[in-house]
Image (spheres, grey):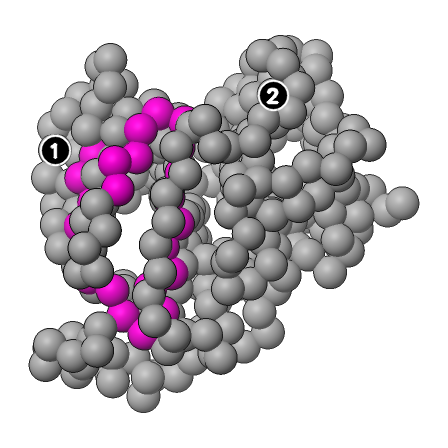
């Protein structure tokens, strides 16, 4: 079985989005090695001023978003009437499809806010399908292992340490595997994924040893091809595993819209301005 190794390490950079929300971002809209993922934003703060404005109503077309909270509360509202109260340990998935208008308001819990929003691309055949939404509270996220070596699987299927594992999210527009690994120093874990999937990691805590290469907190890792990821916590560590089937199509990104051509972007802008984005 071929072991995946570190291909490229990208440091997340400080940015702002929404109404001035401070985030750390790693993105690869035009990087085929990111595919099917487009971007990951990390929200982490103990200061409400960093995020109090939240993300007021805004549109999307052509992507899926996956939001996952380690600590805190995220309130989602959209034009379909969905109201999601995402709390510590939970996740919410939204497929914008042909159009969605939603808002997202982060709320601190016990003096902390820490979560992620991940953008997943949609293939051209699914970019104009109706929007969908579903949330998963913490109790619905499947857990494997114990507090010293815990794998929380949000979506997809894989094999870890010889056992079949899966998450509650199985209806994404493209095949993905998304999980959160938390381990104390010295613990290790292996993840077997389809060789057709690309694999990426985002280290949000500590330092991980990947086949002899150390990767620290705040870095996004693009893995080589292969079938197995071998991880060892060099210190108390937390990381997200983002793996999926790449989409070999042109990517044109403009603000909240991700399509396959500039003509489609212009149509999305026109539809939004004319109030028919979600029709």
Q: Which residue is mark 1?
A: 52
> In this rendering, is residue 270 above or below 139?
below
Question: Is residue 13 found left or right of 224 in the rendered image?
Answer: left
Q: Dot 2: within a 10 Å radius of its alpha carbon, few (fewer than 14), some, or many (20 or more) residues?
A: some
| The C terminus lies in quadrant | bottom left
> In this rendering, is residue 261 above or below 32?
below
Q: Are marks 1 and 2 in contact (CB under 8 Å)?
A: no
Give the x, y percent position of residue 74. 25, 35
Please state the extent of the stretch shown in magenta in the rendering. 84-106
- The answer to whether any part of residue 176 appears in the image is yes
Q: Marks 1 and 2, how far apart in space?
A: 31 Å
Q: Residue furthest right?
A: 1
Give the x, y percent position of residue 27. 43, 53
Q: Please tell me the numbered disc located at residue 193.
A: none
Q: Is residue 138 magenta?
A: no
| The N terminus lies in quadrant | top right
Disc 1 secondary structure class: loop
> In this rendering, is residue 202 above or below 101?
above
Q: Dot 1: within a 10 Å radius of its alpha carbon, few (fewer than 14), some, or many (20 or more) residues?
A: some
Question: Is residue 88 found left or right of 226 in the rendered image?
Answer: left
Question: Is residue 78 found left or right of 135 in the rendered image?
Answer: left
- The answer to whether any part of residue 21 appears in the image is no
Q: Residue at x 77, y 55 (%)?
A: 195
Disc 2 secondary structure class: strand
Q: Residue at x 25, y 36 (%)?
A: 85
The answer to which of marks 1 and 2 sits earlier in the sequence is: 1
- Prevailing secondary structure of the magenta residues: strand
Give the x, y percent position of residue 171. 51, 57
Q: Residue furthest bottom?
A: 263
Q: Picture quarter containing residue 132?
A: bottom left
Q: Is residue 97 magenta?
A: yes
Q: Please tell me the numbered disc located at residue 150.
A: 2
């Amino acid at each position: 079985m071929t072991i995946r190794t570190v291909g490229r390490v990208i440091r997340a950079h400080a940015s702002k989005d929404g109404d001035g929300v401070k985030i750390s971002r790693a993105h690869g809209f035009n990087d085929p090695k990111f595919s099917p993922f487009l971007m990951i934003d990390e929200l982490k703060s103990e200061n409400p001023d960093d995020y109090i404005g939240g993300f007021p109503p805004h549109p999307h077309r052509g992507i899926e978003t996956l939001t996952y909270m380690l600590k805190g509360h995220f309130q989602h509202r959209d034009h379909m009437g969905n109201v999601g109260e995402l709390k510590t340990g939970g996740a919410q998935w939204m497929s914008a499809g042909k159009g969605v208008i939603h808002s997202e308001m982060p709320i601190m819990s016990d003096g902390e806010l820490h979560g992620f929003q991940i953008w997943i691309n949609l293939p051209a055949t699914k970019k104009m399908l109706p929007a969908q939404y579903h949330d998963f509270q913490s109790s619905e996220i499947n857990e494997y292992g114990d507090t010293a070596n815990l794998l929380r699987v949000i979506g997809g299927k894989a094999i870890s340490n010889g056992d079949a594992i899966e998450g509650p999210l199985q209806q994404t527009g493209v095949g993905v595997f998304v999980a959160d690994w938390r381990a104390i120093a010295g613990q290790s874990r292996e993840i077997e994924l389809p060789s057709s999937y690309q694999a990426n990691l985002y280290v949000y805590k500590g330092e991980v040893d990947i086949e002899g290469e150390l990767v620290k907190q705040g870095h996004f890792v693009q893995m080589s091809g292969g079938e197995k990821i071998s991880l060892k916590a060099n210190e108390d560590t937390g990381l997200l595993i983002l793996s999926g089937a790449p989409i070999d199509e042109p990517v044109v990104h403009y603000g909240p819209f991700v399509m396959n051509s500039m003509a489609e972007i212009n149509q999305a802008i026109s539809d939004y301005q004319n109030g028919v984005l979600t029709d």
